[in-house]
Amino acid sequence: MIPFNKPFLVGNETSYIENAVQSGKISGNGDFTKKCQDFFEDKFGFKKTLLTTSCTDALEMTAILMDIKPGDEVIVPSYTFVSTALAYVRQGAKIVFADSRTDHPGIDETKIENLITSKTRAIIVVHYAGVACDMDIIIEVANKYGLFVVEDAAQAIDSFYKGKALGSIGHFGTFSFHETKNIIAGEGGLLTINDERFIDRAEVIWEKGTNRSAFFKGEVDKYGWVDTGSSFLPSELIAAFLYAQLEHLKQIQLKRILLWETYFKQLVLLQEKGKIILPSFPDYATNNAHMFYILTKDSSERDALLTHLKENKIHAVFHYLSLHTSPYYKETLKGNHSDLPQADKYTDCLIRLPFYYNLEIKQVEHIVQCIIQFFK
Ligand SMILES: *Cc1c(COP(=O)(O)O)cnc(C)c1O
């Protein structure tokens, strides 16, 4: 069986964990945490970064930092992972779902302004498959109405919008190092803070509502309970694992891009014959090869192709189920949303093909042959 995903180890993960253990400091906010945060700030120009235990945690931190309260409205794409909405629902916000673009699963920038009311506080965008949303349009709308912008960049490490790193453009950005992402730490995440006004408070919320970070920097002579917060910081063991991966970012990305391009070149004929649709990129966006997906013409063809691949020992998967049709939204939150046809299209027709560092070119060729055979 060719699995859908296989975590890739660069080799130094366990020796770096061993170093952390030997150093005697294994709780959070130690040397490996600083090394990871410095890496992100130096390489991608994020103003301030904080490692978290997940992207979900980083999103929850943004909800606290923006002071989201019951009655507030937050605009979120429907075609995304649960966490993108959940973080704000937990603060009592009403979620207003936005549709996807016709040519890409990312949020349709042109439809956001219609969703804004006097209660709207924030726009959350998701750079699906690491492909940038049109941030100039989104920032312009946000500025016009005085709204916050959060970039859920869980899939978007090492990807850019008009030369700017994704996660550096909104007030906040959030990344994931879950084992299905390009760079992994088992579970792990990162919050980027691009608006200086929030840096001090973010450090407090990160450290259980205490000013412990300021204490260790010598800025205060004792630390205590000063705000709300939680235990959002990962242990040094996770940071050590992550740092080993970050040192190999370039190598990992080169291999993933090679695999991505192999899929694309070999499937392009099926697209020309009108059988499938391949990913497309606006000219302002880069490709970080987070995933390789194809679109079928409808859900029954999608299911038949998945079955065909499974019979050939290839594990391909569909992706998100639009959140506006989820049981939790409809039954528990009593949400009642108008149709979002593009989000539903991606729910019904999108297939993600096996994609991981150790996938071999000849396996990609085999997968492509099985897909071609299906359409014959
Ligand atoms: C993976 C993912 C998340 C969740 O990341 P965790 O680190 O598992 O919390 C959130 N949003 C998107 C778009 C994702 O792809």
Image: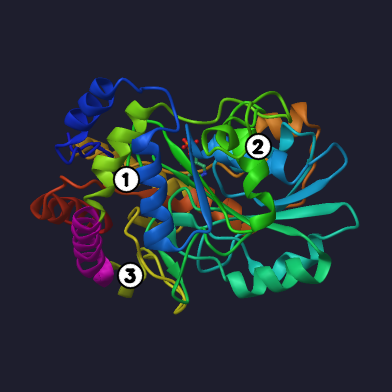
Task: Find disc 3 in the rendering and name its residue.
Answer: 271
Which amino acid lies under the numbered mark 1 shown in the image of this protein?
A: Ile
Number of other residues with Cα within 10 Å of mark 1, as a class: few under 14, some 14 to 19, many 20 or more: many
Task: Find disc 1 in the rendering and name its residue.
Answer: 183
Q: Nearer the viewer, residue 276 or 89?
A: 89
| Disc on res. 45 | none
Q: Is residue 22 left or right of residue 67?
A: left
| Disc on res. 87 | 2
Number of other residues with Cα within 10 Å of mark 3, as a class: few under 14, some 14 to 19, many 20 or more: some
Tell me if residue 200 can be seen.
yes
Q: Quadrant of the N terminus?
A: top left
Q: CA distance from mark 2 to mark 3?
A: 38 Å
* SS at mark 1 in the image: loop
The residue sitting at the bottom extreme is 283
Q: Residue at x 74, y 54 (%)?
A: 122
Residue 45: x percent and y percent? 46, 63
* Disc 3 and disc 1 in contact, CB within 8 angstroms: no
* SS at mark 3 in the image: helix
Which residues are drawn in magenta? 250-269
